[in-house]
Image (tube, coloured by chain):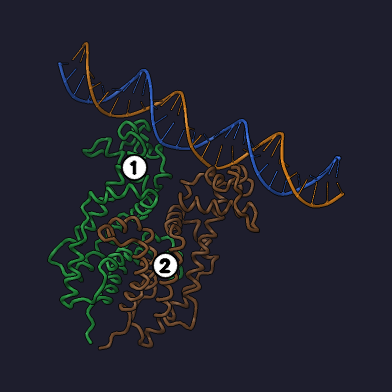
Chain colours: A green, B brown, C blue, D orange
Amino acid sequence: MVEKIDKRHTGTEKIILDAARHVFIRKGFDGARMQEIANEANINKALLHYYFRNKDKLFMAIFVEVIQSFILSTVKLIRNPGHSVFDKIRLFVEKYISFIQGNPYLPGFILNELNRRPDRLVGIFKSSGLELDYFYSQIEKEIREGKIEPVEPEHLLINMISMCIFPFVGKPMINTIILSNSEKDFNLFMEERKRTIPEFIINSIKKQKK
Amino acid sequence: MVEKIDKRHTGTEKIILDAARHVFIRKGFDGARMQEIANEANINKALLHYYFRNKDKLFMAIFVEVIQSFILSTVKLIRNPGHSVFDKIRLFVEKYISFIQGNPYLPGFILNELNRRPDRLVGIFKSSGLELDYFYSQIEKEIREGKIEPVEPEHLLINMISMCIFPFVGKPMINTIILSNSEKDFNLFMEERKRTIPEFIINSIKKQKK
DNA sequence: TTTTGGTTTAACCAATTGGTCGAAAATAAA
DNA sequence: TTTATTTTCGACCAATTGGTTAAACCAAAA
């Protein structure tokens, strides 16, 4: 109990936030216990309330932070000009999956809380400057230029995101159903998907040579 | 409070299960309250414990039921012989999305509980006779016959399931980000996907004419 | 009518949980 | 050093929650 965690140059506030993020992501809002967060931060429970008045405030603090980091990783990729749609698809899938591999419980956490209290979301999203129009116009432009087959941009985007995120949310299911018989493990499967998904998408929308 | 819900030919046990299913799916295990379930069933809280010894037992009862209904709707489609892979893809997407439209909170509930207590899952899945080998062999057969391009069956299946389920899990996100500017609503979007997804998949794996 | 068995209820209990309070350290200001 | 301010803590509280109990209810059998 004595071992003080290396504080670096950060204060108690940061320590609390780190602990809270861990616990909330593992257990969700309802499952998380203030005491558990306090333990993980090696501090007194009363301190939580000293820095963040109540559980709700503490939760929102990390929820906002987490969602914004998630959105940011999306925006950067999609907005970048100078890449063709195909390039962006390859880049997006590769980087997005890698990002989630580093934070495998993020999607489940976000999706769960999103559905439990949808109202809380809107403001966060609006304020994080997610802008998809540029990506949509680029797709429509390349369709007109005959580089790719006609597709609905919204569906293409959702398809791409679905195929990247869903496996992480459904990981226990996939492990049981899909990979049970083979000796393949989940991480290897997701590595394959970095190659497999862009192939799959591009194959579908690239202009056919008749 | 007096209005007795139509019991049909079922007893209190069924009434409790129905109430429990509603509350658990809405709130998850941690968020659900025995009292709330009792209220929704118009019975005394002690009765819950009389029929199902404790919260855990009650939860497992409905969890198993729900998962099996979900799996069953998958198995039926995939196993059916006499359909080509393309037919099955069209049928699967159409029926699967329709099924979830009728139970829109099922995927979120299942995925969440799956991740919270993965261990509980395995047994349920094993006992529900999910068998994918037939589908895999059929795909490999049609690849050999030159009907479809070479693809990894596991990835194809996960892609298909991802594109169907994910939008429901991420509904609040989609509503905010994707459909906010257009007047399109979510249900219409999913109706479109019944056409859009099979098109997208088949386009990707159908044999190219050079 | 009395008995018997399962069913239902109100009242209660112990444990947990989010949150508070006043005092003690620790730190900064004077 | 003395004083004021901020940070940390142990102890406590009120409310909630899962679970129990003993008694009441009620239909069918005896």
Mark 1 Cα shell of 10 Å, populated few (<14), some (14-19), many (≥20)? some
Position of residue B5 measured from the top left corner of the image (x, y, whole percent): 59, 51
Q: Which residue is farthest left?
A: A82
Which residue carries the number 1 mark? A59
Which residue corresponds to the image point at 42% horizontal and 57% vertical from the top-left? B108
Mark 2 Cα shell of 10 Å, populated few (<14), some (14-19), many (≥20)? many
Could you say which quadrant of the image residue B161 lies in? Answer: bottom left
- Identify the element where label 1 is drawn: helix
Which residue carries the number 2 mark? B97
From this view, report whether residue C15 is shown above or below residue B118. Answer: above
Which residue corresponds to the image point at 27% horizontal and 48% vertical from the top-left? A124
Q: Could you give the CA–CA distance between mark 2 and mark 1, rounded to whole angstroms?
A: 33 Å
Amino acid on which disc 2 is placed = Ile
Chain for numbered disc 1: A
Amino acid on which disc 1 is placed = Phe
Q: Are marks 2 and 1 on the same chain?
A: no
Which residue corresponds to the image point at 23% horizontal and 38% vertical from the top-left? A10
